Image: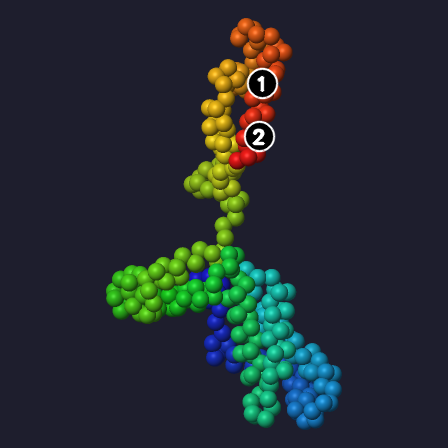
Amino acid sequence: MNAADSLHLDHHTTVEVHTSTTRNTRETDAAAKALLTLLADLPDGEDRSRVRARLIELYLPLAEYLARRFRNRGEQFDDLVQVANLGLIKSVDGYDAGRGAAFTSYAIPMIVGELKRHFRDKGWDVRVPRRLQELRLEITKVSGDLAQDLGRSPTVTDLAARLDVTEEEIIEGLDCGQAYRAMSLDAPVGNDGDTGQTGLGDLLGGVDPDLETVEHRESLRPLLAKLPAREQKIIAMRFFGNLTQSQIAAELGISQMHVSRLLAQALRVLREGLDEG
């Protein structure tokens, strides 16, 4: 089970957080309650920023405490604290003292929800649609129940019927799980006993320089066929046989100057043909 699947704070955990925080910070809570009452009683148009900032400051330890619960799940702790602080700010702005609920009872689910959304949206190495992320979580939840009901591992058809989706969607949901953690190109491959340091990246193909010239070769083929036979032979001897102009001249029984003129004329025709193409 990965981090996105294991993000769970149940009712007992919430009570534990609330109890621990209340027990250790009674004075802070008393001050916070007074500020919450003051914030609720401030008339519209009154500057609320100082009271709001002080409230946020008082509950920063709570946000950090909740962020700490999500450590060691692939995300930097400082980033988690920032996410928890964002949830705290939303809690302060959205809390309604008139409903009678304690602020921590409202804030804790809000902060935890923000942390869960962070893992759901940002915790994937390869970004996949949220629809598939949520479907994958649903597949994980029902797979165990189906296995018990059926006495065997559920098939794609079983999962599709239970979740009321198509088999293609189930396959997509299962495949997207591979995107949560991408494999490093430096990851070793082969048997554990191998002493070589061959990595996954070493097995990936590189750019084939010959492929880059395929288009040019195929474009030149009909143009070469249109050249006179002697000029075709000169080009073949020069560029495929790697002969010098003097060697070509001796082979054909003509002057080196004549070879130079014929070669220049043939290359000009080929270049013009490529430009027109």
Q: For mark 1, give the secondary structure.
A: helix
* Quadrant (top left, top right, bottom left, bottom right) of the N terminus: bottom left
Q: Is residue 230 above or below residue 183?
A: above
* Circle 2 Cα neighbour tier, 10 Å, few/some/many (<14 / 14–19 / ≥20): few
Q: Residue at x 60, y 20 (%)?
A: 264
| x and y percentages locating residue 236 in the rendered image | 51, 18
Residue 38 seen: no
Residue 215 seen: yes
Q: Residue at x 44, y 66 (%)?
A: 131
Q: Residue at x 47, y 79 (%)?
A: 11
Q: Is residue 57 above or below residue 218?
A: below
| x and y percentages locating residue 163 in the rendered image | 34, 69
Quarter of the image for residue 91 reads bottom right
Looking at this view, is 73 or 24 the one in front?
Answer: 73
Q: Nearer the viewer, mark 2 or mark 1?
A: 2
* Circle 1 Cα neighbour tier, 10 Å, few/some/many (<14 / 14–19 / ≥20): some
| x and y percentages locating residue 171 in the rendered image | 36, 59
Quarter of the image for residue 259 reads top right
Q: Residue at x 37, y 62 (%)?
A: 169
* Amino acid type shown at disc 1: Leu
Looking at this view, is 100 or 15 the one in front?
Answer: 100
Q: Which circle marks residue 272 in the picture?
A: 2
| x and y percentages locating residue 196 in the rendered image | 50, 36
Looking at this view, is 212 or 38 the one in front?
Answer: 212
In the image, taking residue 81 as reference, residue 187 lies left or right, namely left
What whole-number distance in Å separates the C-alpha atoms at marks 2 and 1? 14 Å
Q: Is residue 107 above or below residue 185?
A: below
Question: Badge 1 is on which residue?
Answer: 263
Q: For mark 2, give the secondary structure.
A: helix
The earlier-in-sequence mark between 2 and 1 is: 1
Q: Which circle marks residue 126 in the picture?
A: none
* Amino acid type shown at disc 2: Glu
